[in-house]
Image (cartoon, rainbow, N blue to C red):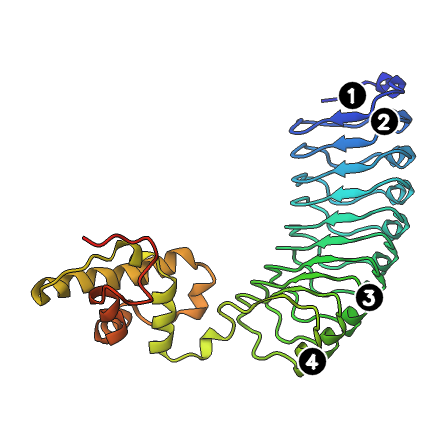
Amino acid sequence: MLLPPSIGRLKNLKYLNLNCTTNLLLPEEIGDLASLNKLRLHLSSIVSLPPSVGRLQNLDYLDLSWTEDLSNLPEEIGDLSSLNRLNLCYSGITLLPPSIGQLKNLKNLNLNCTKNLLELPVEIGDLVSLNKLHLSKSKITLLPPSIGRLKNLKDLDLSSTKSLLQLPEEIRELASLTTLDSSKSVITVLPPSIGRLQNLNNLDLSWTEDLSNLPEEIGDLANLKKLNLDSVCKEDLRGENKLFFAVACNRARSQIRIIQTKPKLWPLMLNNATRAFDEFKRYYSPASKRTYSVKKTDAIYHLLLSEAFTGLLIDRNTKDFPTGTKET
């Protein structure tokens, strides 16, 4: 779609939705939309933004999500003095221009799933109003030390970042940070300075399989209310312990039936042991590929030998019996 130059005469236009448009080309006159505060280009075929976009002084929200053909932003993006939200999720962006740091009113920057973005510019630290920075599933390899200047940042999402191995020491300067999500990341170590995050109340490190230990300073997080370490360091567990972890997580227990006679009990145990393994693999994949290395035959064998597992099947009063499961 080619928008006509006359679109610039729509002086009262506040909302322009061009989602899912193909062959989209924005004219220079787009910059004349003096009242525009929302511009949505989600899933469009846009390949570039005209420099005139910087003249949209009332623009509050710019949605460029799923614009896979968009590889860069014009330097004039930094002139959007009113911009509050910038969504580049699933875009083809390869870098952010240094002028990004001029967005003094930007509060929400979504860079989730930006597969071509390997680094953030130093100027990211100049976003004085930023309170949400999302980098989940991005290919970011490091966070610049300047990130410590984000004094108003409250929510930092680094989940499923497969190239980011560590956090900078400057993370300690994020005085307002309340939520740090590094789940399913390849973080290998947490800097001791993390203990300085006195407002942090939610720390998610679940499925960070390469994280071998926590720094002693973790105990300095006085306001921490939620710490998720689900499956951390499971690779160090013995096979039998991994097995019981699977049993605890599996959905098979909801299918358990109480059989009174032993001849009928063993087929049931085999069925549920097999289900325990299969359900665990299904619901915890792909992370479980590394955390659960026991062979299926060995897993079932150990399950059948386990008195604890047998107890789940034959003890009507066990405290581990799933709530709401009906006996038959």
Name the amino acid, label 4: Glu
Q: Which residue is mark 1?
A: 3
Name the amino acid, label 3: Gly
Q: Earlier in the sequence, mark 2 or mark 1?
A: 1
Q: Which residue is mark 4?
A: 217
| Rendered view: 55 above or below 315 | above
Q: CA distance from mark 4 to mark 2?
A: 52 Å
Q: In front of the other: label 4 or label 1?
A: 4
Q: Residues within 10 Å of mark 4 (few under 14, many from 20)?
A: some
* Secondary structure category for the residue under label 1: loop
Q: CA distance from mark 4 to mark 3?
A: 18 Å
Q: Earlier in the sequence, mark 3 or mark 2?
A: 2
Name the amino acid, label 1: Leu
Q: Residues within 10 Å of mark 3 (few under 14, many from 20)?
A: many
Along the horizontal axis of the image, is 1 left or right of 211? Answer: right
Q: Which residue is mark 2?
A: 30
Determine whether label 2 and label 1 are within 8 Å by CB. yes
| Rendered view: 325 above or below 12 | below
| Rendered view: 176 above or below 46 | below
Please tell me which residue lies in front, 173 or 72: 173
Residue at horizontal 86 percent and vertical 42 percent from the top: 77
Q: In front of the other: label 3 or label 2?
A: 3
Q: Residues within 10 Å of mark 1 (few under 14, many from 20)?
A: few
Q: Earlier in the sequence, mark 4 or mark 1?
A: 1
Q: Which residue is mark 3?
A: 148
Q: CA distance from mark 3 to mark 2?
A: 36 Å
Q: Earlier in the sequence, mark 4 or mark 3?
A: 3
